[in-house]
Amino acid sequence: MAGEPQADCLFCKIVQGEVPATVVRETRTTVAFRDINPQAPTHVLVIPRVHYSDALSLASAEPAVAADVLREAGEVAAQEKVDATGYRIVFNTGPGAGQTVFHAHAHVLGGRDLQRLV
Ligand code: 5GP
Ligand code: ZN
């Protein structure tokens, strides 16, 4: 069924506590944890507890949860105190954009000069 945990999904395993992670925030619908290979002083991943392969699939099927992910990304930035200096929320979508884990997730990056991308 759509949104159900996938046995072969790393982030579903983190949601279920089967793979350890440094969790910084949790809500009923989301989990936020530090990226294992940080690209900035603050690099946190915000994921929905439900499994969808990418941001569009999540937003189409469960828009309220997609909104929760986005709001939590901002709450993480505030908690990490990078909100005043600025931060970036990234959803890599598809292999050509660098997506390697196919469970929707927002990267929250901050704490250094991130340079303008687009
Ligand atoms: P993507 O490349 O799909 O946009 O992002 C996946 C992210 O997950 C990468 O930044 C990668 O460093 C991170 N990652 C991969 N495996 C693990 C893990 O086991 N634990 C944590 N905390 N992050 C992981
Ligand atoms: Zn998953």
Image (cartoon, rainbow, N blue to C red):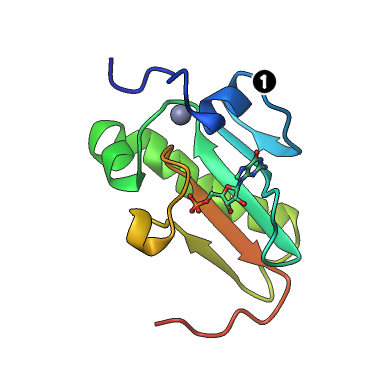
The answer to whether residue 96 is left or right of residue 13 is left
What type is the residue that disc 1 sits on? Gly
Residue 10 placed where, x, y %?
Answer: 55, 31
- Give the residue drawn at x 35%, y 23%: 3
Q: How many marks?
A: 1
Label 1 neighbourhood size at 10 Å, few (<14), some (14-19), many (20+)? few
Where is 20 relative to 90, above or below?
Answer: above
In the image, 68 versus 53, the foreground residue is 53
In the image, 98 versus 1, the foreground residue is 98
Where is 96 relative to 67, above or below?
Answer: below
Residue 42 placed where, x, y %?
Answer: 72, 61
- The image quarter containing residue 46 is top right
Residue 93 in sight here: no
Task: Work out which quarter of the rendered image holds the C terminus and state it.
Answer: bottom left
Where is 7 relative to 89, above or below?
Answer: above
The answer to whether residue 114 is left or right of residue 92 is right
Where is 37 relative to 114, above or below?
Answer: above
The answer to whether residue 6 is left or right of residue 79 is left
- The image quarter containing residue 2 is top left
- Give the residue drawn at x 33%, y 53%: 94
SS category of the residue bearing label 1:
loop
The answer to whether residue 59 is left or right of residue 87 is left
Residue 36 placed where, x, y %?
Answer: 70, 48
Residue 19 in sight here: yes
Task: Work out which quarter of the rendered image holds the N terminus and state it.
Answer: top left
- Give the residue drawn at x 54%, y 67%: 88
List the residue tagged with mark 1: 17
Q: Residue furthest left?
A: 60
- Give the residue drawn at x 35%, y 37%: 53
